[in-house]
Image (cartoon, grey):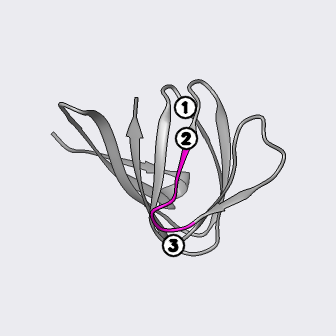
Amino acid sequence: MLKTNEYFDGNVKSIALENTEGTATVGVMAPGEYEFGTSTVEYMTVVSGELTVLLPGETEWKSYKPFDTFVVAKDTKFKLIVKEDTAYKCIYK
């Protein structure tokens, strides 16, 4: 069954599903600055737009564009800057 999620006063929205491959979400983010925590390893892929990301333990921000993927470790926090409406896909492992 599909599950909808909404964060940051509706500025981040996603739809989650579970299948034989595990849990995945597809979502959109409005412009802004966000910080997320993880409970699993997350594989984030930009679908449209751009995400500027500060990963745990890093000191430099890095930009990701369509089809770029970054991995966030379990039980950490990461920061995002979104300059334009952006769509993403996230796989949880």
Magenta extent: 65-70
The secondary structure type at the circle numbered 1 is loop
State whether residue 22 is above or below residue 30: above
**Separation of residues labelled 3 and 2 (CA atoms):** 18 Å
Percent x, y of residue 74 = 56, 26
In this rendered view, identify the residue nearer to me: 12 or 83.
83
Q: Is residue 9 magenta?
A: no
What's under tag 3, amino acid-wise? Gly
Q: CA distance from mark 3 to mark 1?
A: 22 Å
Q: Nearer the viewer, residue 70 or 82?
A: 70
Residue at the disc numbered 3: 49
Label tally? 3
**Label 1, on which residue?**
38
Residues at circles 1 and 2 in contact by the CB criterion of under 8 Å: no
* Tag in front: 3 or 1: 3
- Residue 81 lies, with reference to residue 38, above or below; the image says below
Please report whichever mark, 1 or 2, sits nearer to the chain's N-terminal start: 1
Name the kind of residue labelled 1 in the image: Thr
Task: Mark 1: give few (<14), some (14-19) or many (20+) Cα within 10 Å.
Answer: some
Q: Decide whether the magenta segment is chiefly helix, strand or loop.
A: loop
Give the residue at mark 2: 71
**Does label 3 or label 1 sit earlier along the sequence?**
1
Residue displayed at 57% across by 68% down: 50
Q: Residue at x 71, y 57 (%)?
A: 62
Snapshot quadrant of residue 28? bottom left
Is 47 left, or right, of 15 in this rendering? right
